[in-house]
Amino acid sequence: MARRNLLYAQSGGVTPVINATAAAVIEAARRRTDAFGQVLAARDGIVGVLTERLIDTASLQDDELAALSHTPGGVFGSCRYKLRDVAEDRREYERIIEVFRAHDIGCFLYNGGNDSADTAWKLSQVAERLEYPLQCIGVPKTIDNDLAVTDSSPGFGSVAKYVAVSILEASLDVLSMASTSTRVFVLEVMGRHAGWIAAAAGLAQREQGDPPQVILLPERGFDQARFLDAVQQSVERNGYCSVVVSEGLRDQQGQFLADAGGKDAFGHRQLGGVGPMIAELITDQLGFKNHWAVADYLQRSARHIASQTDLEHARAVGEAAVELAVEGQNGVMPVIRRISDHPYRWTTEAASLERIANQEKTLPDHFISEDGFGITPACREYLAPLIRGEAFPPFAADGLPRYVRPRLAELPRRLDRFPL
């Protein structure tokens, strides 16, 4: 059987460890010279496929690949681009197959979340209809931890660790100033529909009264009176209050509190600003001096405090994706399956992309405390292993991490340009 080329691409919001997955894919594919010819990467995800901006990863030296595992961002670039429905417009799908044919690509690995799984699933179906031999394999990642089927999503563990550490450290700052200055701190974290990141902040609660005293989750409608009462009680009892709020917090009618009015390429509402809204409410109704912060890109780029467990997950799914390709599988994604909590043991297995595409895994009810402002022991047991271990990057003499930005030369185009 003739060896065909493998193409890898990154999609959606990046994570602290997505480059570790990229490195694992490239290293594993290089070892299987019996199965693959060139190992290529697309610039800026599926957009790079449409525009035929392809990179030969052979230019990456072994030391650069090793450095990718501790470098944040997305080395090949990412995108938020939704392919049109094939029933409405076949043009983009035909173009993708045309690019694959021109570069003899027999396997496409798409590293992303729910929407990326949908893209890979659609491509696997379209290629079959167009009678082009192609394996499409999704590779999981998302800091939101909302991918269906998989126990956890690579990228989430490191963000969970960053948020838990950040609220712990900021709360110690507030506590030291609370008698004469700031009494409340509000931290806004990502999570449009699922409160996994906000819930992870609860890991900082080692004892009763520890921060964050209030967690606001999108799975629970916001009750202003109950919230203000919880803040008031925490200040009276502890001297201060730390609040973690998910960007996707909704009111009792299910409307986002901080709807920015726009939509992204996938039709998701653009959110932002719920943190300052909550802080302003505290000022107006309770009169407490407060500060607010938005973790935003900091949480998903904080490779300096990455979770060792998360790094191992990220590399494992990359290696597993290549093995699934070698086995001839199509329309699947390697997912994490938890074997036990004590000790924490896990493995990877294949799951159909059809079961994952466009699905969202939200925080289950039994993970949310009865008052709706915290997490349960069951949630803590689930989360705790995901932030264990420190995967520090090497640091240079100037005190900064040794992150890499390798030069990536694109292959010459073989087709006419394609207008997006």
Image (spheres, rainbow, N blue to C red):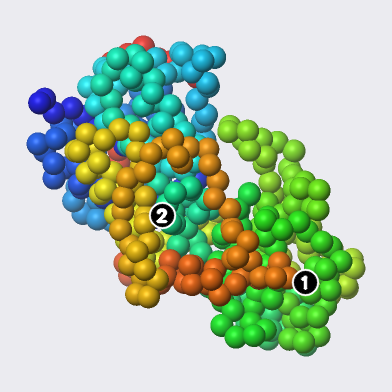
**Placement of 331 over or under 196, stated as above or below:** above
Query: Which comes before the other along the chain, label 1 or label 2?
Result: 2
**How far across and down, in percent of the image, does residue 380 sit?**
53, 72
Residue 410 seen in the current view: no
Helix, strand or loop status at disc 1: strand
**Placement of 379 over or under 254, stated as above or below:** below
Q: Residues within 10 Å of mark 1 (few under 14, many from 20)?
A: many
Q: Residues within 10 Å of mark 2 (few under 14, many from 20)?
A: many
**Amino acid under disc 1:** Asn
**Amino acid under disc 2:** Pro
Helix, strand or loop status at disc 2: loop
Q: Which residue is mark 1?
A: 290
Q: 40 or 372: which is nearer to us? A: 372
**How far across and down, in percent of the image, does residue 242 sit?**
69, 74
Q: Which residue is mark 2?
A: 154
Residue 134 seen in the current view: yes
Residue at the (63%, 49%) spot, across then down? 192
* Label 1 vs label 2, nearer the camera: 2
Quadrant of residue 116 within the rendered picture = top left
